[in-house]
Amino acid sequence: MRLVRYSDYGRGIMPLGQTDGYTLSLIGELPAPVIKASGGRIEIATTDTGKDLLPEHQWGRKIKFPRLAKDKKTVVFDVELLLPDEDVEGLEELSGTLEYLTADASRAVDLGIMDFKVGAKGGKLGTVIRSIEKDPWQKNAAMLSLRLNLRPEVLESAEFFAQDGTKLDVSKRGCEAIAGTTTLKFSIKGKLPPKGRIVLNVFEGLKKNEIPFKLTDISLTGQSLR
C-alpha cells in the first residue's frame, strides 16, 4: 500500500519516489494456471464516505503490469486511485476486471542446425542472432540475443543444443518486444559451440480472457472492516 498526501517535484520532495496519491496492492487467484496476466481495469472505487476515487482519465484506471506467481494461478496487481480524504477509514467497494491469456496447446518449433554467430538465421519464425557478448553477471557464460517474429506471450520456452545433440545450460535474461517482433536475451553457461540447434516451444490457440473482481468494506490497507 502507498499513501502519499504531499509531494513537490520542484522542491525535490517525493515520498516513496512518487507524487501524492494512493495505491493498493492486491492478490487474487485465477480459476486455473494461465500463460500471462495481461492487464485489466478498475470500474468502481468508492470510499465509506461515498467519495469516488477513480482516476479522471481511462488510462489511469487501467491495471498495469500485473504479475503472476510461480504457480501461474496467483496474480498480484496494483490499483492506483485518487487520494482519499483524511476522514476516510476504508473503501465501501473496489471492483473491476482482470485480463489474462490462456492457450489450447503448445508445439515445438525446431529451427534446424545454425551457426552460433552474429547475423546467423534460423530456419523459421524469422529468427536472427542479433548479438553474442560476455555475460556480465556470470563467469564463463555468453549472452546471446535472439530476434523472433513472435509476440513475447506466444513463446513458452527455448532450448539450445550443440550440434552433437548435447543440451546447453541456458537461462533467460530479458525480453524486448516491438510491433510483433521480440528480442530475447539468454545466458549460456560454458563455451558456446560454433554450431547448434534451437528449439522454440510456442503456444497455439492463444485466447484473451476476463474475470471480474470485487472487494467490499475494506480498510485503506486492504483488511476487512466487517
Image (spheres, helix red, strand yellow):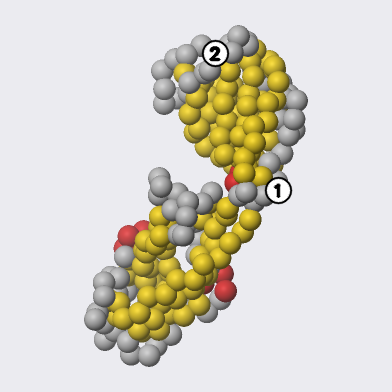
Q: Mark 1 points at which residue?
A: 179
Q: Can residue 178 be seen in this view?
A: no
Whole-number angstrom distance, CA of label 2 to CA of label 1: 34 Å
Percent from the top left, x then y, of residue 51? 39, 88
**Badge 1 element:** loop
**Badge 2 element:** loop
* Mark 2 Cα-neighbour bin, 10 Å: few <14, some 14–19, many ≥20: few
Residue 6's tag is: none
Identify residue type, mark 1: Ala
> In terms of depth relative to the viewer, which is nearer, 6 or 165?
165
On the image, which quarter does residue 119 sit in? top right
Instruction: Identify the residue at image location x=48%, y=21%.
Output: 169
Quarter that holds the C terminus: bottom left
Q: Where 142 falls versus 201 (above or below)?
A: above
Q: Can residue 23 be seen in this view?
A: yes
Q: Name the residue under label 2.
A: 166
Judge from the rendering whether residue 201 lies leftward or rightward of residue 92; answer left or right.
Answer: right
Instruction: Identify the residue at image location x=57%, y=54%.
Output: 101
* Mark 1 Cα-neighbour bin, 10 Å: few <14, some 14–19, many ≥20: few
Q: Nearer the viewer, mark 2 or mark 1?
A: 2
Instruction: Identify the residue at image location x=62%, y=44%.
Output: 105
On the image, which quarter does residue 30 sit in? bottom left
Q: Earlier in the sequence, mark 2 or mark 1?
A: 2
- Marks 2/1 in contact by CB < 8 Å: the verdict is no
Percent from the top left, x then y, of residue 135? 48, 23
Percent from the top left, x then y, of residue 148? 68, 35
Instruction: Identify the residue at image location x=61%, y=59%.
Output: 208
Percent from the top left, x then y, of residue 42? 49, 73
Q: Which residue lies furthest to the bottom in this view?
A: 50
What is the number of callouts on the image?
2
Identify residue type, mark 2: Thr
